[in-house]
Amino acid sequence: MKTQVLAASGLGLFLTAAATAQPVSVTYPVPTLDRWMYPFGGQPGRETSIPIFGAIEIPGFDDRDGQGLFGFTTTAEVPAGLPVARYRVVSARLTLTVSVDNQFQYDPSFDSFRSVLLTSDPLYVADTDAGKPVEVFGVGYRNGWTAQTFGEYNTFGGAPIIPPSEGARNCFSAIFDQNGVATDVSRQVRQRFDVTPMATGQIAAVSPGGWVPVGTKVVFDLDVCEPTSQAYLRKNLADGQVRLMVSSLFPAQGGPEGGSGNYSAYYTKESPLANGNTAMLELEAIVSNGADFNNDGFVNGDDYDLFASFFDAANPLADFNGDCFVNGDDYDAFAEAFDQG
Ligand SMILES: [Ca+2]
Ligand SMILES: [Ca+2]
Ligand SMILES: [Ca+2]
Ligand SMILES: [Ca+2]
């Protein structure tokens, strides 16, 4: 699978044939919005730093308590409003810059929710590596808010209006089912389930377990090959903006040791200290014309022939359903689109 991922991500491997839709590569060096999703944030959207931490099993707080919402408007480079199947995200990388000095330990890998339970809990297991991973999820909404209506400066949550409140934030770290329905993972510890994020933060300059200096880049390569993540990102492009939520179970309160001040934080575009080190998104995407595979404005046998030749060559551009494999599923998906004209 790793090889397939790399093959589909390497621009050089895309053959330039006919007028088949090619990937576009875009870098967004500054987010359209960055916002601390925390019930006590005094100036929502105007923070100069976004701390990411948990309040593990503390009544009235979500386990993933301080979260960071980042959004990038993509309409200038990737036309919005097309059917979602027209979009394919080949790669997506979010980069954040650490705004605190040696305040947290780098953990590059998955930790079960069980590692932040009280040691007296029958499900408790010890954490086998220092720190907690910092993770990226898609964004879910409640209380009638949507990606179109919830902005950088809107109110944190619904009832109870006076915080603390749990399960009430208007947008949240989410996983999605096959139909795109969001599940809030912010209370996963008390609700007792593990989650797989779209990406886990990686740091090239620090060894696992090491303390992370201010200015360090944390890179999140989103797993675009995971179907629900690909579907989320496709819908984002159709909506004209990519939105991501960063969160973690670094316990500021609760957890086996009672919590600490050892958690990460990141510069925002409002920070006078950021010096260009705001959240950045690097995106590689394809906007296809569906069954009009050669983009000549007609759906006919030429498209079928061209698709078949790409398919036979296992060209990544024949990955019609965007799962990072070229196989019979793509042939079926193309044939279905072709039959529909
Ligand atoms: Ca902001
Ligand atoms: Ca750990
Ligand atoms: Ca055509
Ligand atoms: Ca495929």
Image: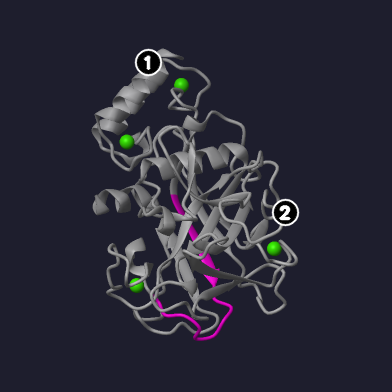
Along the viewing direction, whichever of 60 and 263 lies nearer the viewer: 60
In this rendering, is residue 274 above or below 190? below
Along the viewing direction, whichever of 228 and 328 lies nearer the viewer: 228
Left or right of 166? Residue 341 is left
Q: Is residue 286 visible?
A: no
Q: Does label 2 point to a residue whose CB lies under 8 Å from ligand 1?
A: no
Task: State the residue position of label 2.
Answer: 155
In this rendering, is residue 10 above or below 19? below
User: Residue 63, how many percent across, how many down?
Assistant: 49, 62
Look at 74% across and 67% down and name the residue there. Answer: 42
Which residues are drawn in magenta? Answer: 91-106
The span from disc 2 to disc 1 (Cα, nearest Å) is: 53 Å
| Callout 1 crowding tier (Cα within 10 Å): few <14, some 14–19, many ≥20 | few
Look at 39% across and 36% down and name the residue there. Answer: 17
User: Residue 65, how many percent across, how many down?
Assistant: 55, 63
Q: Is residue 25 magenta?
A: no
Task: State the residue position of label 1.
Answer: 301
Look at 69% across and 66% down and name the residue there. Answer: 41
In this rendering, is residue 151 above or below 178? below
Left or right of 12? Residue 53 is right
Left or right of 198? Residue 1 is left
The quadrant holding residue 51 is bottom right
The quadrant holding residue 29 is bottom right
Q: Secondary structure at mark 2?
A: loop
Q: Amino acid at mark 2?
A: Thr
The numbered mark, 2 or 1, whose residue comes first in the sequence reads 2
Q: Amino acid at mark 1?
A: Gly
Q: Secondary structure at mark 1?
A: helix
